[in-house]
Image: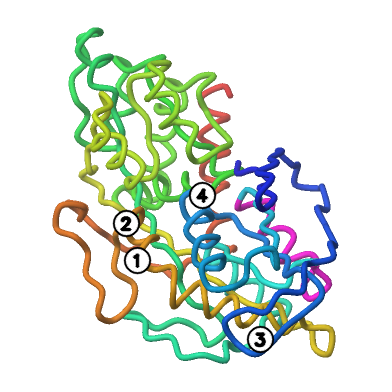
Amino acid sequence: MKKMNMKKGNVKRAASLTLAAAVAVTGLGLTGCDTGSSDEQVIIYSNADEEAITAMENALDSNGYEGQYMFQTFGTSELGGKLLAEGTDIEADMVTMSTFYVESAQEQNSMFTDLSFDVDTIDAFEPYCAPITSQEGTIIVNTEMMEENGLSMPESIADLADPAYKGYVSVTDIAASSTAWLLIQALVSEYGEDGAQDVLAGIYENVGDHLEDSGSAPLKKVRAGEVAIGFGLRQQAVADKADGLPIDYIDPAEGNFSLTESVAVIDKGEDANPLAMEMAQCIIENGREERQSYYPNALYNGESTDAANKSANPKVFPEKLTVDLLEQHQAVSEAAKEAAGL
């Protein structure tokens, strides 16, 4: 689960699903790139990873918005719950969030205003949101631990259910983090829901105490040598390997499934902060180069995915991603946990 990140202070804390995190702060009243100005900071709620937050902060700060905004970060399920429950009453002026949650929240609450700037995406997106990242899942291994413990390299997610890996695996719980949905999408797409449940039960038996709430926790445990194998975000494993850590990644036979995160501006009517739309445009137009260095998938026309960073088996789930589908797959996971005795 991601944590709160207050701009400049970098103050972080975990929050529960029921916690209403709301902050109202008086800003510095500086002038940004455009003509708009405001005496109140723009509050941005986000489920983004640290690298994406930093890239967005850099884009805003370098274009005149330093001190005029505050990021608050949440786990995907937590922030999704706030969007669905609070609608336009949410404290935030802007969100960056998993696109499927943005779309579901708009369908339920009509809470986002159409973007006032052009968005030239490769794939079609709704007029009220624009993608900031595309994240893929993959199998991550600690090469030193694999060798020391005589473990063979897995080739598929289903391989993680092999009893030979018992105690050596860490994955994320879909009840807390959307990273796990990348794993479950791959299993359901390949084996159907019943088959996916059977595979998951075997994986959960091997995971034991290493079923995590945070999407980055499996990588951190693999990096620290607490486990030998994890499932996590591909770009983080690519970065670790490039830094010379004993980390490698295996694009699973079931496929590298992906999720996008998008920016959207809350429809506050007459109470709207005029800087929110400006900042959304700034994030899209000035932050893509840095974000793509961490999240290489091309999203906009004119971009390309670096061949060295391109996954071996990219796939898209055959059904549209929605909160209802997420809940359906969460039920598959819960049944698997019960079968595994968790």
Closer to us: 306 or 216 = 306
Q: Which amino acid is tagged 3?
A: Thr
Q: Secondary structure at mark 4?
A: loop
Q: Secondary structure at mark 2?
A: helix
The residue beneath circle 3 is 113
Task: Specify few, some or many for label 2: CA neighbours under 10 Å numbering under 14, 14-19, or 20 or more.
Answer: some
Marks 4 and 3 sit apart, C-alpha to C-alpha, by 25 Å
Q: Which numbered disc covers residue 49?
A: 4
Q: Which amino acid is tagged 4?
A: Asp
Number of the front mark, 4 or 3? 4
The residue beneath circle 2 is 293
Marks 2 and 4 sit apart, C-alpha to C-alpha, by 14 Å
The quarter of the rendered structure image containing the C terminus is: top right
The residue beneath circle 1 is 289
Please state the extent of the stretch shown in magenta in the rendering.
76-90
The image quarter containing residue 82 is: bottom right
Position in image of residue 15 (x %, y %): 74, 42
Q: Which amino acid is tagged 2?
A: Ser
Q: Are marks 4 and 1 in contact (CB under 8 Å)?
A: no
